[in-house]
Amino acid sequence: MRPLILALILTLTAVCLVLVALEMPPLGNPSAPSQASPTTAYYNKQAVTDTGCLSHVAAIVCDYRAYDTLGETTVLFTAIAAILALKNSREGSAGE
Amino acid sequence: MNDLILKEVARFLFPFIELYGFYIVFHGHLSPGGGFAGGVVCGAGFILYTLAHGHKALYSLLPRHIWTFCESAGLAFFIFLGLVGIFVGREFLANSSAGFPLGRTGELFSSGLVFLLNLAIGLKVASTVTTLFLNLEEED
């Protein structure tokens, strides 16, 4: 019974995902929401003069969205802190 | 691992991998790449060195406390750069409005905050990848 329910759920999820993927506009379509938005036009026009970066990706990651990058860096820091804490606590209890 | 060819190749390749990683980090604002990609390349170089020569060799190259220090220093440097904006009276992580010199577009030392943030991220990612490997690998 359980594999059957699992298969059903997975098939439903796959159908939903494929339907969404079919809805998506083709890559580079100028009328796609990501291309037509005024933010994209602003970045294309202003990124070099605002930040002095030739790479627009760097301009967005490290200047316009730098706060988001701080979050990503914090994720890395938290992961390492958790691993070191777990490892050290295991070594400590093994030594006792 | 006690393979002479692996050891010699790793010893030969190690500086070039690190140099390429530094290149990607330093040119983050000019070409594709940046702190994350360059940091991972640097970390991969350290991992290759560790795989060939063992943990002791890497720790004699850069002791353990340096790795944990880099770990925190990357994030602290990032936050410090952000706070500069607040101390000058602008918003958090402000770039040219906080007084970071933008320089001439297209030169290596340009774009103020973006260059420094790439350095911070590169330091952080390189030490994270390496520390992760060192701590998960020496278990067995």
Image (cartoon, rainbow, N blue to C red):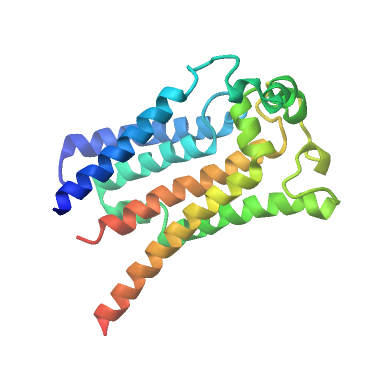
Total residue callouts: 0
**Residue A46: % across, % down:** 75, 24
Residue displayed at 43% across by 57% down: A79
Q: Position of residue A56 (x, y in %)?
A: 63, 26
Seen at 52% across and 42% down, the residue is B122
Is residue B64 among the parts visible in the rendering?
yes
> B11 or B44, which is in the foreground?
B44
On screen, residue A26 above or below A77 = above
Residue, x 70% and y 21% (percent of image)?
A41
User: In the depicted view, which residue is nearer to us: B59 or A72?
Assistant: A72
Q: Is residue B37 above or below residue A21?
A: below
Q: Going by the image, does A81 lie left or right of A65?
A: left
Could one spot residue B30 in this view of the protein?
Answer: no
Tell me: A27 left or right of B50. right
Q: Is residue B33 left or right of residue B51?
A: right
Tell me which corner region of the image, top left, top right, bottom left or bottom right, holds residue A84.
Answer: bottom left
Residue B88: percent from left, percent from top? 84, 51
Q: Residue furthest bottom?
A: A96
| Residue B26 sits in quarter | top right
Q: Quadrant of the C terminus of chain B?
A: bottom left
Q: Nearer the viewer, residue A87 or A11?
A: A11
Where residue B79 sits, quadrant-wise, is bottom right
Is B50 above or below relative to B71? above
Residue sitting farthest toward the right:
B89
Q: Position of residue B66 (x, y in %)?
A: 47, 58
Q: Relative to residue B85, is residue A46 depicted above or below?
A: above
